[in-house]
Image (tube, rainbow, N blue to C red):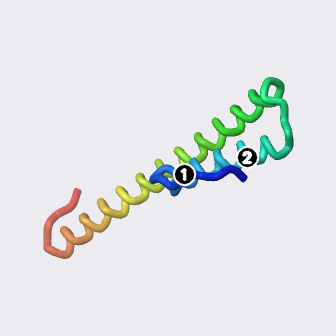
Amino acid sequence: MSETIPSESSKDPLWVVAHLYMDDMLDKHLDPVDDMPRVITRLQYLLNMELRRRAHQDADARWHEDTNNALEAMRAGAVVR
């Protein structure tokens, strides 16, 4: 496996997956010209899935925060609509 330079991006799961995928491609001696479109397509798929996962996490966090705020307001006697 190639040597990595530690950085903030190296802690990002998406960066790690992309790096491992490229290392795997190089280890299998895949032809960059013939196999690169397939590799790029796979990386795009992984990127989209990670972006969706992060968007759902953010939406869930906002929903929980809004719900908790509404519950606290109700406990304080406010009318929540």
Residue nearest the observer in this picture, 7 or 54: 7
Give the residue displayed 64% in from the left and 52% down from the top. Answer: 3
With respect to residue 6, does 71 lie above or below?
below
Q: Which quarter shows the C terminus?
A: bottom left
Crowd class of label 1 (few under 14; some 14 to 19; many from 20; radius 10 Å): few
Residue nearest the observer in this picture, 17 or 6: 6
Q: Earlier in the sequence, mark 2 or mark 1?
A: 1
Left or right, 44 with reference to 30: left
With respect to residue 25, does 1 lie above or below?
below
Residue 68 % position (x, y): 29, 68
Residue 24 % position (x, y): 77, 47
Looking at the rendered structure, the secondary structure element under dot 1 is loop
- The quadrant holding residue 47 is top right
Give the residue displayed 71% in from the left and 42% down from the top. Answer: 22
Looking at the rendered structure, the secondary structure element under dot 2 is helix
Q: Which residue is mark 2?
A: 23
Q: Which residue is mark 1?
A: 5
